[in-house]
Amino acid sequence: MQDEGLAIINVLTPQVAWVSGKGNVQITVGGTLQEPVAQGIANFENATVRARAFPEPLTALTGRVRFEGDRIRVEGIRGQLSQGEIVAQGIIPLSVPFAAGDADAATPLTVNLDKLALNLRGLYRGNAVGQVQATGTALRPQLSGNIELYEGEVFLPGVGDATQLVSAPAAETPAPATSSPATPAPSALPAFEVGLNDLRLNLGRRIQVTSQPILSFQATGGLTVNGTLRIFALQARSG
């Protein structure tokens, strides 16, 4: 498949949506919706995709991804995001985490962030550089690493607040109960969720920390972030 036929990526990894560009995909998909497996390769050239982990599309995307059973091997993916650049390299399972002692666990998917201008609603608005490792699985990644924030604003959640990913779909209104027999729901892909595992945020120059409606102050030092992009906990640490 070439170019617009690459929309099959939306089915295999629904957290990533193909928008446009050039590429070539040769993939055989098997397994189940809960535990998919794939074999093949995907090449990208000046492509645009939307990833649910980011608020804006990735553009000028180039590089190669190999699918080997339950493994996704990212080989030098490079793209533009929010006026900066992202470079990704490494391995992440599709749906089943690495077993203890698995050799591939030594090469986790690593993403380098260079001069990004981010607008993550309810989390952060401003600039960022750093490196993030994605462990877990492609359907439920766990992010760790170090990111420096500068010239921006960090938003702390209030009591009972749930910080939501910008591009997460809205929850559906449940249907009213009826007296007719229940029909089993068809199998579906597991819900996509981004976990935060001791992700260290270093507060650089001109960072404002805000917790509405009572707190707003300049800050230095750092924060350690745990939880998910829907609900997360922050632990302050001195600089």
Image: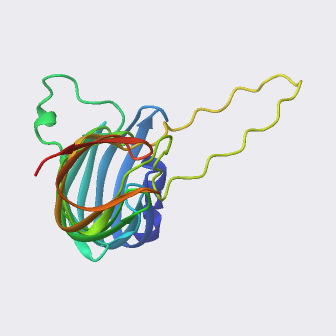
Q: Quadrant of residue 79?
A: bottom left
Q: Quadrant of residue 94?
A: top left
How many callouts does the rendering have?
0
Q: Residue furthest front?
A: 214
Query: Residue 72, image x and y in percent?
Result: 27, 45
Which image quarter is the N terminus in?
bottom left
Query: Residue 49, image x and y in percent?
Result: 39, 66
Q: Is residue 137 shown above or below 8?
A: above
Query: Residue 153, image x and y in percent?
Result: 32, 65
Q: Does residue 33 show up?
A: yes
Q: How is the image coloured?
A: rainbow
Is residue 101 or residue 44 the one in the foreground? 101
Is residue 98 or residue 53 the one in the foreground? 53
Q: Residue at x 44, y 61 (%)?
A: 121
Query: Residue 152, image x and y in percent?
Result: 28, 69
Is residue 10 or residue 213 the one in the foreground? 213
Q: Is residue 87 shown above or below 66?
A: below
Q: Is residue 99 left or right of residue 18?
A: left
Q: Residue at x 43, y 37 (%)?
A: 30
Q: Does residue 2 show up?
A: no
Q: Residue at x 45, y 49 (%)?
A: 163
Q: Is residue 229 left or right of residue 68?
A: right
Q: Is residue 61 left or right of residue 122?
A: left
